[in-house]
């Protein structure tokens, strides 16, 4: 899997996947899942090392999303625009522009979000039978998630990487707080097509 993938912005991701052949998206999917275990283990080790003074553990319990996001969101950083990326339009026309930071996330932060997305997905897989990874194929190369790894088992497939970037932007701008990832989990639980497990 290309290392550049983790640092792509939304437009680049769309082009990257939109032009894939079936065999290429299958190969990417395979490599994406193979890489997931090592990435999640590294995330858990880094979290535990940084959280030595508290008892939180990343055990794939939904409640673990609260300390995980509290930790991860505090490590997010933005970078300056490149000349090619600079917005062509005045961002002050965007609602809420005065409290929003439109700059892109730094590469290291994008990789962290990718790792948290793996963990977020695994929380669903381990707690809700019927949720699993699949390749999104609806036959439209312009569809946002076409050819990408997504989670099935919901009313509509879930792309955890896209969701994490949205939550990260809102968190960075202080529009949501430390419960944002846990709240996102509960929102998607309500979109399951399988029966939620009993408590």
Image (tube, rainbow, N blue to C red):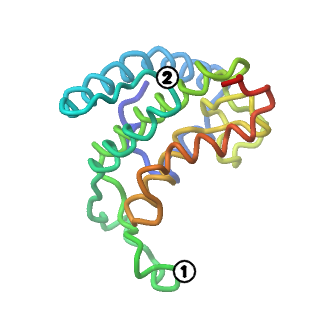
Q: Is 51 on the left or on the right of 63, as rendered? A: left
- Against 187, residue 150 (above or below) is above
Image quarter hosting the C terminus: top right
Residue ID for mark 1 = 95
Q: Which residue is mark 2?
A: 32
Residue 72 drawn above or below residue 36: below
Q: Position of residue 185 (x, y in %)?
A: 59, 40
Q: Earlier in the sequence, mark 1 or mark 2?
A: 2
Instruction: State the separation of the CA atoms marked 1 and 2.
Output: 36 Å
Q: Residue at x 30, y 63 (%)?
A: 82
Q: Quadrant of residue 194?
A: top right
Q: Quadrant of residue 18?
A: top right
x then y, percent, for residue 22: 68, 24
| Quarter of image, res 95 | bottom right
| Place of residue 60 in the rendered image (x, y in percent of width and height, measured from the top left) | 48, 23
The secondary element bearing badge 1 is classed as loop
The residue depicted at 44 percent of the width and 20 percent of the height is: 36
């Amino acid at each position: 899997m290309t290392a550049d993938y983790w640092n792509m912005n939304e437009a680049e991701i769309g082009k990257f996947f939109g032009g894939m052949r079936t065999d290429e998206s299958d190969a990417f999917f395979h490599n994406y899942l193979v890489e997931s275990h090592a990435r999640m283990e590294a995330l858990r080790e880094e979290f535990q090392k940084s959280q030595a003074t508290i008892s939180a553990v990343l055990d794939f319990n939904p409640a673990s999303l609260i300390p995980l996001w509290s930790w991860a969101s505090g490590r997010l950083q933005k970078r300056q625009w490149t000349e090619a990326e600079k917005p062509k339009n005045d961002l002050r026309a965007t609602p809420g522009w005065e409290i929003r930071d439109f700059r892109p996330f730094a590469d290291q932060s994008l990789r962290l979000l990718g790792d948290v997305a793996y963990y977020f997905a695994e929380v669903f897989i381990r707690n809700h039978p019927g949720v699993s990874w699949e390749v999104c194929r609806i036959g439209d190369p312009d569809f946002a998630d076409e050819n990408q790894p997504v989670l099935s088992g919901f009313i509509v497939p879930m792309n955890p990487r896209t969701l994490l970037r949205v939550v990260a932007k809102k968190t960075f701008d202080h529009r949501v707080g430390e419960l944002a990832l846990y709240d996102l989990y509960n929102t998607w639980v309500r979109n399951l097509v399988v029966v939620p497990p009993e408590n």
